[in-house]
Amino acid sequence: MGATLGVGMVGYAFMGAAHSQAWRTAGRFFDLPLAPELTALCGRDRSALATAAHRLGWRSVETDWTALLGRDDIALVDICSPGDTHADIAIAALDAGKHVLCEKPLANTVDEARAMAAAATKAAERGVRSMVGFSYRRVPAVALARRLVARGRIGEIRHVRASYQQDWIVDPEFPLVWRLRRESAGSGALGDIGAHIVDMAQYLTGDLLTGVCALTETFVPERPLPGSNTRGKVTVDDAALFLGRFAGGALASFEATRFATGRKNALRIELNGSRGSLAFDLESLNELRFYDGTEDAETAGFRRILVTEPTHPYAGAWWPPGHLLGYEHTFTHQVADLVADIAADRDPEPSFADGLRVQLVLDAVQRSAAANGTWHPVPEES
Ligand code: SOE
């Protein structure tokens, strides 16, 4: 038996379940240098926690995250709790010498994200690693798109067109859950799903947004409080639309909304370059569309690449070509990469600094929207 990596996870709802599945599976499909152990699950409600730990495969429970950090059998803390908890837990965990995987968005504010990035840099000097969970970077088709851009296959990038559309709160009677409150979630569609497309755009282009102009809207300003007859105020955006400019000169458009009726989890991104284009749609996540502008015009056209070949990113660890992967696999890839980086003493990506770069964009979007869509620069961060 090789060395193990004791994992302690905070939170056990949707993301907790997705991460648990990844911790359980990664070592069965990827040749990991350290064997992850689902050592302890942490949450506040002891009885719900015990049920979740049993269902998700965790060996023990803790109701206080500080107790989790004090345990010698835990080497990595995985933060899947709401955004308002990220900074405190992550910084304390890094200070305690624990590696950290933190769900996106990294934090609720730029100040928190900055403090987290600084703690991560300090911890890395001691070999303590951190990663922010922009899991869609690990869709094989998205990783292949990055590879093609880096190889210059679409040339100089001129346009990025990104949208992320959901519809789970179209009903005005949908309750005021934590994702709809600024104090727990930071922002609404912007931070939850807009963060994904901002990160993906910066990752795929290898470039950074320098400024934005934005509109946000809250279509349903009050909602029923969970389990009550009274209503409370929605304090986040329901939708955010913005334009942006990249340092390298590309122009970008972004749309993040929870009001696209009929669109369940539709993330789409297209890049147009001087030599070609790439297009990805999360609802067909095994596919990447590629237009090679250097081909003879007579036969050139968008081609559909089925990203399941052993030579494609991650795909070789799974099934034979054509046997498709899904949403959950992105989390497994994330864990596999993180464990490999920890063992190799390398800084994982996306780093907390990458998370901060996204946070700076989200903040500029909010400032621009508050100023009626005026142009707001995204400050550079060293
Ligand atoms: C929101 O509905 C959400 O669950 C996001 O928080 C996730 O990051 C995204 O993967 C799916 O949608």
Image (cartoon, helix red, strand yellow):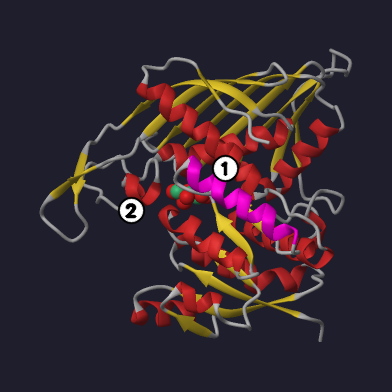
Residue 142, position as x, y percentages in the image:
70, 41
Q: Is residue 120 magenta?
A: yes
Q: Which mark is residue 283?
A: 1
Q: Which mark is residue 178?
A: 2
Is residue 47 placed above or below 232 in the rendered structure? below
Front residue (pair 289, 164): 164
Look at label 2 and name its amino acid. Answer: Trp
Label 2 vs label 1, nearer the camera = 2
Is residue 180 placed above or below 202 in the rendered structure? below
Front residue (pair 274, 240): 240
Q: Quadrant of the N terminus?
A: bottom right
* Residue reaching furthest to the left: 229
Residue 133 seen in render? no
Q: Does the magenta stretch include residue 146?
A: no
Residue 148, position as x, y percentages in the image:
82, 34
In the image, which residues are magenta? Answer: 110-125
Residue 234 seen in render? yes
Look at label 1 and name its amino acid. Answer: Glu
Q: Which of marks 2 and 1 is nearer the N terminus?
A: 2
Front residue (pair 338, 223): 338
Residue that appears at 43% across and 65% down: 13
Is residue 253 placed above or below 31 in the rendered structure? above
Dominant SS in magenta: helix
Q: Quadrant of the C terminus?
A: top right
Residue 366, position as x, y percentages in the image:
42, 29
Looking at the rendered structure, the secondary structure element under dot 2 is helix
